[in-house]
DNA sequence: TTGTATGCGTTATCAG
DNA sequence: CTGATAACGCATACAA
């Protein structure tokens, strides 16, 4: 059941069938009807590979995320998928596990599959392992994490500002000794959030005990181990700033094991929301990134490149984050600030930095 | 930079290059070396579409889930992806949004892409919209939800037993008036869990107020609205059995709005875990399904079909669930039972029902 | 408006 | 062990 079978059945040439199927070119109404009937009779489904071989387009885009069980990334995925599907693209979702090697392997596979575009939250500091994308001119959008030495449209959250706000919040509540549980320092959000944290402290005239700042990976277990160590080696802090939701979960585990209550004994704030947790009890004060929007926007930028609609220089877009105040800092719940948006994001203020 | 460029560069035929690349057939050592050098020089990457057109295999399998932000499904995805990648397959992850139409659209796309196999948690009661998979002989594994009138390997959690245990737990704690917040009655887990619930109550000589049993969809918002209605129209229950994690979250939202505390005022248990929430505070008593194992197993079954290793009749596998007791029922935390497994699942007892 | 013919980049079948 | 060559299923330039 290939295109030629349909052609024979309808008494036309394969070219005509192709025109009917693709909708390109002129076909007489009655001829079209005959072809459509044949297609239906034979249950003809065009072979996407053969088509792709000819057109050099696969109709697929890849989305590579470092951690598929993190709801931040799945929400981004939702956004990407919705926009992509709406424009006739399928999304291949890959989980890179914060591993540059695995990321590279995926990229190579994608290149071989002649994927039409790639959206990824990269794991390394540089984009050296992505050069094949540039070489093969595969449209690429980087999100969540900026990359050094790699030109591509980039969509990130405004981590510096968000971290400043989150830190100020703690400072205003009277905290002066704040521990910072960071993720992988190779990734830009890690550095940005630490920077915002440090800036806010400096302006407030506060100093940081270096022992209260820990780096590592973005895995829960790692954060847990580091907070564990922190508690035994350098206690004395009254609050914790977790660089993302997973770091916060790790911190919570360690604190719980030590019988330390949040926010009674230690305050806790973090980047990214932990939706499920907050249902139970308005709990963690967070700086929620517009994940869904990050996904839709990334997909839009990518599609513009794929369709050639945009040929401008790489665009850098920074999205504002949403401050959600809950009672994790010892403060009372502020109803007006408690506007946890579900499903789609609430308004997200974006600023375009690049061209 | 196609295979013929490599052939020319290495001074051999395309057939020889193909043999080197695919690893099939005899090639002299020195010839192979020359070819490999040419491949490296030219940065040759074989075109997967051309290969697929010839071999009729895409090297891809599709995983269709109803709700991508539900950690149960992302955990399954992790399992599927790990096994698939290990065997050289890529995974296309699709989100069907509990929508049969969207599911059908995905399936059609997959068939056109000559996907090698499909793993899906279907949305409808029957598999009538999946017949194209049978027609085209696309290996298929159904997981999480059984399908009527569709022959395929199936991997599910043992919902009936799990529901019985969960219900007995509530009964033993003294609850006699239990509300049941179900999901979509078109899906088998919904029916199985209600059945287990009813069985346990019957054995205990308890009756159910029909107004306390609600059906609908598997969306959080829907459960929330139904519990909301329940609270105003038929209060009086002392416990809630939520058919899955999302139903529980919806219930929690409604309860919170009414100022009803869990477990103080109303007890709550559910199927599937809410990992993040439990980190904060050992909270919900749940019947956790072995999601990761469900993923790896589904992938294994599928690969056996794809490789033709298994040609037996459809296999039905039911996986035992893990009972995690926390303090959501008014009981004290039982340390020995508190063994929430992370990452990979703890032991999961499986029973093969079919051939 | 329709048909013919060619090629996309591989793999596989045969000779050699 | 290696090479020539014919498909695979479709899209498209060019003819008609």
Image (cartoon, coloured by chain):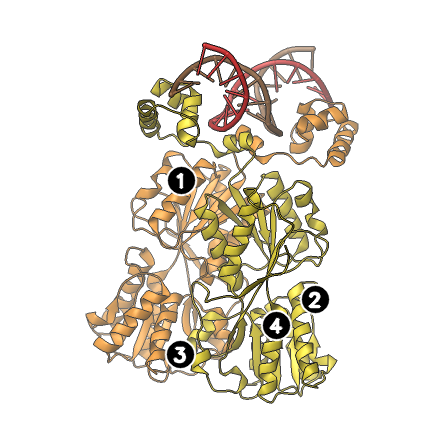
Chain colours: A orange, B yellow, C red, D brown
Horizontal side of residue A215 vs A145, given as left or right: left
Local SS, label 2: loop
Q: Are marks 1 and 4 in contact (CB under 8 Å)?
A: no
* Chain of the residue where label 4 is placed in the rendered structure: B
Task: Mark 2 vs mark 1: tell me if same chain.
Answer: no
What residue did someone put label 2 on? B185
Local packing at callout 2 (Cα closer than 10 Å; few below 14, some 14-19, many 20+) is: some
- Name which residue lies at 61% across and 69% down: B159
Cα distance, mark 3 to mark 2?
39 Å
Local SS, label 1: helix
Local SS, label 3: helix
Tell which circle, 4 or 2, labels the residue nearer the N-terminal end: 4
Cα distance, mark 1 to mark 3?
44 Å
Indicate which disc residue B161 carries: 4
What residue did someone put label 3 on? A328
* Chain of the residue where label 2 is placed in the rendered structure: B
Q: Are marks 1 and 3 in contact (CB under 8 Å)?
A: no
* Chain of the residue where label 1 is placed in the rendered structure: A
Taking depth in this image into account, of B236 and A171 the one nearest to the observer is B236
Q: Quadrant of residue A216?
A: bottom left
Question: Whole-percent x and y of residue B257?
Answer: 57, 81
Q: Quadrant of residue A202?
A: bottom left
Local packing at callout 3 (Cα closer than 10 Å; few below 14, some 14-19, many 20+) is: many
Cα distance, mark 4 to mark 3?
38 Å
What residue did someone put label 1 on? A108
Local SS, label 4: helix
Quarter the C terminus of chain B occupies: bottom right
Judge depth for marks 1 and 3 and give the one in front: 1
């Amino acid at each position: 059941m290939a295109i030629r079978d349909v052609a024979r059945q309808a008494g036309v040439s394969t070219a005509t069938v192709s025109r009917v199927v693709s909708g390109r070119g002129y076909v007489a109404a009655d001829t079209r009807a005959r072809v459509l009937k044949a297609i239906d009779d034979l249950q003809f489904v065009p072979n996407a590979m053969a088509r792709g071989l000819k057109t050099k387009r696969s109709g697929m885009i890849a989305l590579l995320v470092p951690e598929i069980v993190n709801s931040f990334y799945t929400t981004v995925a939702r956004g990407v998928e919705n926009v992509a599907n709406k424009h006739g693209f399928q999304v291949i979702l890959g989980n890179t596990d914060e591993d540059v090697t695995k990321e590279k392997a995926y990229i190579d596979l994608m290149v071989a599959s002649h994927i039409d575009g790639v959206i990824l939250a990269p794991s390394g500091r540089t984009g050296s392992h992505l050069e094949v994308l540039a070489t093969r001119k595969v449209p690429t959008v980087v999100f969540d994490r900026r990359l050094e030495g790699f030109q591509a449209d980039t969509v990130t959250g405004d981590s510096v500002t968000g971290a400043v706000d989150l830190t100020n919040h703690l400072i205003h509540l009277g905290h002066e000794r704040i521990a910072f549980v960071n993720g992988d320092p190779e990734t830009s959000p890690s550095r940005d959030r630490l920077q915002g944290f440090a800036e806010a402290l400096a302006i407030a005239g506060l100093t940081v005990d270096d022992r209260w700042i820990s780096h590592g990976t973005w895995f829960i277990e790692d954060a847990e181990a580091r907070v564990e160590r922190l508690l035994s080696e350098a206690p004395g802090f009254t609050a914790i700033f977790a660089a993302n939701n997973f770091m916060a979960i790790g911190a919570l585990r360690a604190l719980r094991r030590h019988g330390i209550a949040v926010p009674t004994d230690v305050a806790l704030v973090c980047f990214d929301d932990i939706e499920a947790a907050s249902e139970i009890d308005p709990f963690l004060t967070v700086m929620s990134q517009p994940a869904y929007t990050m996904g839709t926007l990334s997909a839009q930028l990518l599609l513009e490149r794929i369709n050639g609609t945009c040929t401008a220089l790489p665009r850098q877009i920074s999205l504002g984050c949403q401050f959600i105040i809950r009672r994790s800092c010892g403060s009372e719940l502020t109803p007006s600030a408690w506007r946890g948006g579900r499903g789609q994001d609430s308004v997200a203020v974006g600023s375009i930095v690049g061209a």
